[in-house]
Amino acid sequence: MIGPMQAIVDAHAHRYPAEVLADPAGWAGARGESYWQSLTGSGSLQGWADERTMRNDMDAARIAHTVIQGWYWQHQETCDEMNAAAARWARETPDRFTVLASVQPAAGEAAVEGVKRALDEGCRGVGELHPWVQGWSLTCEAWREIATLCEERGLPVCFHATETVGRAYPGKVATPLQDYVDFAHAFPKLNIVLAHWGGGLPFFHLARGSGGVPKNLYYDTAASPLLYKPDIWQAVAETAGGDRILFGSDYPLRLSRKKGLGESLRDLVTEAEVNLPPDAASAVLAENARRIYRIF
């Protein structure tokens, strides 16, 4: 178990500007972000937290630093708007927040320029991406240019990865895992994080004749209680290795319908500590994220 004084890094959380929190559906509708809007309605698991609430919840869960992921917006204009806000947060509180850039590669050159601008302004990678929601291919020219840029700068990318079995739920869209493997082979020097335990990909580390899972693929644990039983922590540490796993919460997603955001976050930390092998805990809960996202 990780020591009580050791800082934890949350490698996968989300944060939204005040105008989004004031009217999420209206804000999304005005920008044509229909997919994200569909996830904010009545009964949704999406929670909301302003900066003070977020920091208080992180403090109570012993999380010292948080990686703010972007989102897979449908329009590059939305990405640019959110990247500007993210860069501002990173400048204001660099000791607490690392931010990633959102991008819509289907926008072509505008997407490439948007990412360059976001990285120059302080974003430390690109993600969270979802090609099958955004409508672009991992082989498209704009995305290859963005991936090359990140590879050259030593910055990571993060993809949403969907489990291929299990229950249906709002917003569930398949992500062909082989496409991620092929992409990782094509960019061997690029660190690639697959969210949500990689959609089950870690278990293919045991597959025979698969050619192996590329060494530059990593897995974060975002939304774990909604997707997997607690046994997942030990199982993936044993199959893929503790050096491949990054603790992530998906805050402020509601990990429990019965508990508040802060209590659910503390429960997730406890679940990780109890179920991780002792020799993997420090790496999973802090060290891997610090290395991949260059948090110093």
Image (cartoon, rainbow, N blue to C red):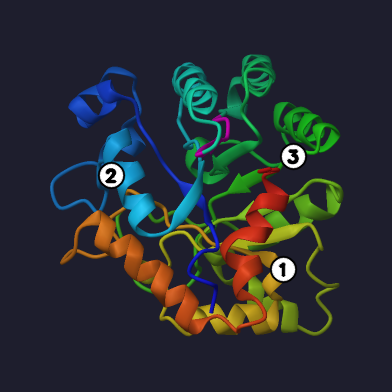
Residues at discs 3 and 2 in contact (Cβ within 8 Å): no
Local secondary structure at mark 2: loop
Circle 3: residue type: Thr
Look at the image and say whether residue 101 sits in the magenta stretch: yes
In which quadrant will I find the C terminus?
A: top right
Query: Above or below — where is 48 with respect to 269?
Result: above
Query: For mark 3, what is the residue?
Result: 139
Quick one: 85 or 23, which is closer to the camera? Answer: 85
**Residue 61: where, in percent of width, then height?**
37, 60
Q: Residues within 10 Å of mark 3 (few under 14, many from 20)?
A: few
**Residue 156: where, in percent of width, then height?**
70, 43
Which residue is at 49% across, 57% downward?
Answer: 248
Circle 1: residue type: Asp
Closer to the chain start, of discs 3 and 1, is 3
Local secondary structure at mark 3: loop
Query: For mark 2, what is the residue?
Result: 39
Closer to the chain start, of discs 3 and 2, is 2
Local secondary structure at mark 1: helix
Q: Which residues are magenta?
A: 96-102
Residues at discs 3 and 1 in contact (Cβ within 8 Å): no
Left or right of 226, for residue 137: right
Left or right of 142, for residue 97: left
Quick one: 75 or 221, which is closer to the camera? Answer: 221
